Image: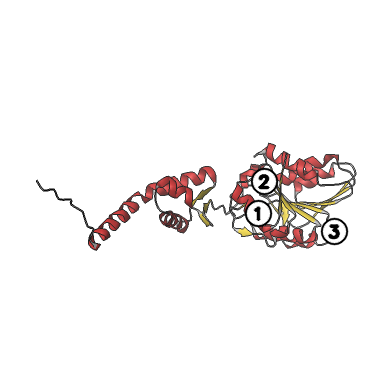
């Protein structure tokens, strides 16, 4: 008996039909992928194109299309290599005050270790800078400049400390002065060291902010202070907020309570500010 080997030759039409079928399957599964992507974002704050492609066993191009679709719907923000949750507004000061208290206390102690008796210190508004104020209780002969009502109240109770409350309109949510008057008041001081808040530390290693006033005020303090440090707890790693802080790269460093993911560390190192991890 003669046996014949049969070899299937795919015609251009067959290849086109297979590709069309794959494309239709990918579209059919897209809603499931979108749901899982959003679930991961809610849990981790960021997602990676490479990790998602491996998880779903699809091409990176498919994941890029998924992320673009979700970004167009306002459900995430695209960044290099993936996506992050987009946060347009910050929670009120009273809501944030009890969050990550131990982490903020460790950052406060690390920041206070950079302050010497007799210095002029600017303390930005925020709950982490309030932790710095608490940690400065042992310092003497300080001059404190701040826009924060809570920090001014805390520091004015310390002996041998002079407090300058920088004027401006009070933002009830932040419990701090904001606006043109606050920016003008900052220019009158010679500052040895400034401790600044921020909205987030993006996957690209950039400190970002929620408001234009906040971004501009922090930019000016970087320019004016002999040394300026951003203080950010680990809940802000990978978070992207709407506004860039001009010249943030000129800051001396970023003080954190835990080491950020390696990609963020490398991106921050390329940009310039040093990383200080609180003990």
Residue drawn at the location 74% of the way across and 61% of the way down: 220
| Identity of the residue furthest to the top in this view | 102
> In terms of depth relative to the viewer, which is nearer, 35 or 176?
35
Residue drawn at the location 76% of the way across and 58% of the way down: 221
Place of residue 145 in the rendered image (x, y in percent of width and height, measured from the top left): 81, 52
Mark 1 in CB contact with mark 2 (< 8 angstroms): no
Q: Which residue is mark 1?
A: 268
> In terms of depth relative to the viewer, which is nearer, 93 or 223?
223
Q: In the rendered view, would you say 255 is above or below 11?
A: above
Q: Which residue is mark 3?
A: 190
Q: Is residue 237 left or right of residue 191?
A: left
Q: Which residue is mark 2?
A: 93
Image quarter for residue 273? bottom right
Q: Please indicate, yes or no, whether residue 200 appears anywhere in the rendered image.
A: no
User: How many neighbours does mark 2 have within 10 angstroms: few (below 14), some (14-19), or many (20 or more)?
Assistant: some
The tag earlier along the polypeptide, 1 or 2, is 2
Display colour scheme: secondary structure
Q: Please indicate, yes or no, whether residue 55 appears anywhere in the rendered image.
A: yes
Residue drawn at the location 54% of the way across and 44% of the way down: 44
Element at badge 2? helix
| Identity of the residue furthest to the left in this view | 1
User: How many neighbours does mark 3 have within 10 angstroms: few (below 14), some (14-19), or many (20 or more)?
Assistant: some
User: How many neighbours does mark 1 have within 10 angstroms: few (below 14), some (14-19), or many (20 or more)?
Assistant: many
């Amino acid at each position: 008996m003669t046996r014949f080997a049969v070899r299937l030759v795919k015609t251009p039409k067959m290849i086109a039909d297979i590709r069309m079928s794959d494309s239709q399957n990918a579209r059919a599964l897209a809603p499931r992928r979108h749901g899982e992507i959003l679930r991961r974002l809610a849990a981790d704050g960021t997602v990676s194109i490479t990790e998602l492609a491996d998880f779903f066993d699809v091409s990176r191009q498919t994941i890029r299309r998924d992320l673009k679709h979700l970004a167009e719907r306002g459900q995430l923000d695209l960044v290099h290599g993936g996506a992050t949750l987009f946060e347009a507004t910050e929670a009120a000061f009273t809501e944030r005050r009890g969050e990550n208290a131990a982490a903020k206390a460790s950052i406060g102690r690390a920041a206070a270790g950079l302050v010497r008796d007799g210095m002029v210190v600017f303390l930005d508004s925020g709950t982490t800078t309030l932790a710095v104020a608490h940690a400065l209780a042992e310092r003497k002969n300080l001059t404190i400049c701040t826009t924060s009502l809570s920090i001014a109240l805390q520091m004015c109770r310390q002996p041998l400390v002079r407090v300058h409350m920088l004027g401006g309109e009070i933002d009830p949510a932040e419990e701090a002065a904001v606006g043109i008057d606050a920016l003008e008041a900052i220019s009158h001081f010679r500052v040895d060291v400034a401790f600044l808040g921020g909205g987030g530390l993006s996957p690209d290693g950039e400190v970002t902010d929620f408001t234009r006033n906040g971004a501009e005020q922090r930019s000016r303090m970087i320019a004016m202070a002999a040394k300026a440090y951003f203080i950010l707890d680990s809940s802000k790693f990978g978070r992207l907020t709407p506004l860039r802080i001009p010249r943030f790269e000129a800051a001396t460093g970023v003080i954190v309570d835990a080491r950020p993911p390696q990609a963020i560390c490398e991106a921050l190192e390329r940009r310039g500010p040093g990383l200080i991890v609180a003990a």
